Image: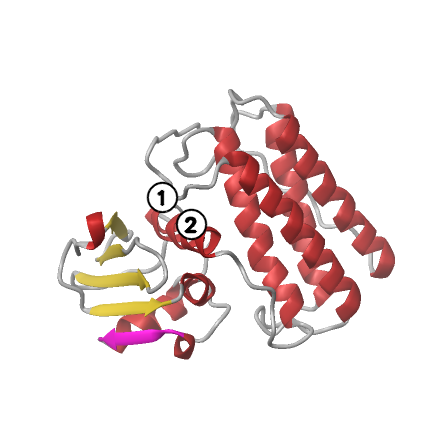
Amino acid sequence: MIVRAAAVTICRMNTAEFIESLDLQGQLMAAAAEKAGPDAEVPTCPGWQVRDLLRHTGVVHRWATAFVTAGHKEFHPEPDQPDLDGDALTAWFREGHTLLVAALRAAPEDLDCWTFFAAPSPLAFWARRQAHETAIHRVDAEAALGPEVTALPVEFAADGVDELLRGFHARDRSRVRTGEPRVLRVRPTDYEQAWTVRLSEGPPRTELDVDGSPQAAADCELSGPAERLYLTLWNRLPHSAIAVSGDEALARLWRETSQVV
């Protein structure tokens, strides 16, 4: 299934810039993983060590590369994780990341392959998705070293919020549900866009606030710098990192049920 939609992204970044972001984030992730070591605990992924992070992300990179290079039109499962550790595991991760970046750079604009939510094109989808996949897990790798992580550009972080709300959580698989209709607003304080998230017994429905005008009165608003919103919505920062106004139960609901599946 290939789904295309011209207006899925708010971002002014183009595909080449997403690929550059992917390249940088993967390099930073590998460097952090090497410094932390495979046994280091990953506090943002409870129960995981750095080796688990490298294996997971490395498999995702190879999985994505197969769609781009082979042009699979249907879903294909992820490959098995490797039985590697230490320096060999890090080298395997670097190799897979390099192959993905090269595949995206070489792919034609009219690439035709499977994607799993709306995007202007399959190439745009995979470049964007893998840039954000790798950025979030780079944060995880750096978190294994301590609380200080490399900053993300505002434009990239805002796009990551948009991808999460209007991409992942627009799908039927989203578990963020409420028995009665509620409205959650997500508002960056350093970016001109905001989102109105309508919650119900069905999947969330997110609308862009046109010209900053809210689409509906909010029961709860999450606000703060785009990067903090991005990491908080991905449950990499606590909600204390942003401002929560209104019904805090909706913020707790997000944290408890928003894990992407």
Residue drawn where x is 39% and y is 36% of the image: 118
- Determine which quarter of the picture holds residue 186: bottom left
Three-letter residue code for mark 1: Ile
* Circle 2: element type: helix
> Quarter of the image containing the N terminus?
top left
Q: Position of residue 35 (x, y in %)?
A: 78, 68
Residue drawn where x is 82% and y is 51% of the image: 91
Mark 2 = which residue?
159
**223 over 92 or under it: above or below:** below
* Circle 1: element type: loop
Residue drawn where x is 79% and y is 63% of the image: 34
Residue 37 visible? The answer is no
- Determine which quarter of the picture holds residue 218: bottom left
View extreme (bottom): residue: 240
**Disc 2 and disc 1 in contact, CB within 8 angstroms:** yes
Residue drawn where x is 30% and y is 53% of the image: 193
Q: Main secondary structure of the magenta part?
A: strand
Residue 27 visible? The answer is yes
Q: Earlier in the sequence, mark 2 or mark 1?
A: 1
Residue 243 painted magenta: yes
Q: Nearer the viewer, residue 141 or 12?
A: 12
Three-letter residue code for mark 2: Asp
Q: Residues within 10 Å of mark 2 (few under 14, many from 20)?
A: many
Q: Residues within 10 Å of mark 1 (few under 14, many from 20)?
A: some
| Image-based side of 189 in relation to 16, left or right | left
**171 over 247 or under it: above or below:** above
Q: Position of residue 240 (x, y in %)?
A: 40, 79
Mark 1 = which residue?
10
Q: CA distance from mark 2 to mark 1?
A: 7 Å
- The span picked out in magenta is 242-246
